[in-house]
Image (tube, grey):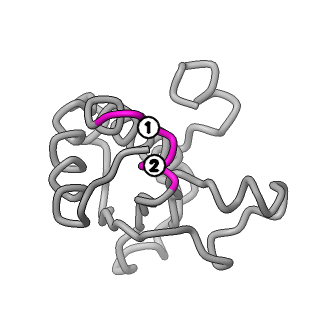
Amino acid sequence: MVEISEHDFELAVRDALDEVPPQLLELLDNVAFFVEDEPGPEHADPGLSDEDNAELLGIYLGTPLTERDAGWAGSLPDRIVLFRGPLTRMCDDLDELREEIAVTIVHEAGHHVGIDEERLHELGWG
């Protein structure tokens, strides 16, 4: 587990964003990033156990680019939420934490551009 302050975690998120492929970041359209301490019931995936839901590293909340239509214009930004608690619990040091944050960002950004869970795992971003 990595002991890290909220402020330093947010700095680690900024560092991790530098590791995300720029081509992917360029595809993001109207997306805001947030950090929360723990996933709550509003983030629960009904296909996962309570234990697995409690250890979510991140979540994409929005409408993937592949599903948007003309009525989408003017909507609030989509959200990518990173969960500090599960991320820090699974990592042994700051370098591993930054790497896992980057992987989580790529994974959730992948959902934003329309890549499903199975394909993200095939690509190594699971």
| Residue 88 painted magenta | yes
Measured in 3D between alpha carbons, the distance from the residue under mark 1 to the one under mark 2, in whole angstroms, is: 7 Å
* Quarter of the rendering occupied by the C terminus: top right
Q: What residue sits 25% from the left and 56% below the top?
A: 9
Magenta residues, dominant SS class: helix
In the foreground, 104 or 65: 104
Residues at circles 1 and 2 in contact by the CB criterion of under 8 Å? yes
* Quadrant in which residue 45 is drawn: bottom right
Q: What residue sits 64% from the left and 27% below the top?
A: 119
Q: Which amino acid does the dot numbered 1 rest on?
A: Cys
- Which residue is labeled 1 in the image? 91
| Residue 92 painted magenta | yes
Could you say whether the residue bearing mark 2 is in a helix, strand or loop? helix
* Quarter of the rendering occupied by the N terminus: top left
- Which residue is labeled 2 in the image? 87
Q: Which amino acid does the dot numbered 2 rest on?
A: Leu
Could you say whether the residue bearing mark 1 is in a helix, strand or loop? loop
* Picture coordinates of residue 64, whole percent (x, y): 52, 55
* Picture coordinates of residue 36, whole percent (x, y): 41, 70
The label number, if any, that marks residue 22 in the structure image? none
* Quadrant in which residue 43 is drawn: bottom right
* Picture coordinates of residue 3, whole percent (x, y): 32, 52
Question: Range of the magenta residues?
Answer: 86-93
Taking 78 as reference, is 51 left or right?
Answer: right
* Picture coordinates of residue 21, whole percent (x, y): 26, 28
Instruction: In the rendered view, tell whether residue 27 sits above or below residue 93.
Output: below
* Quadrant in which residue 115 is drawn: top right
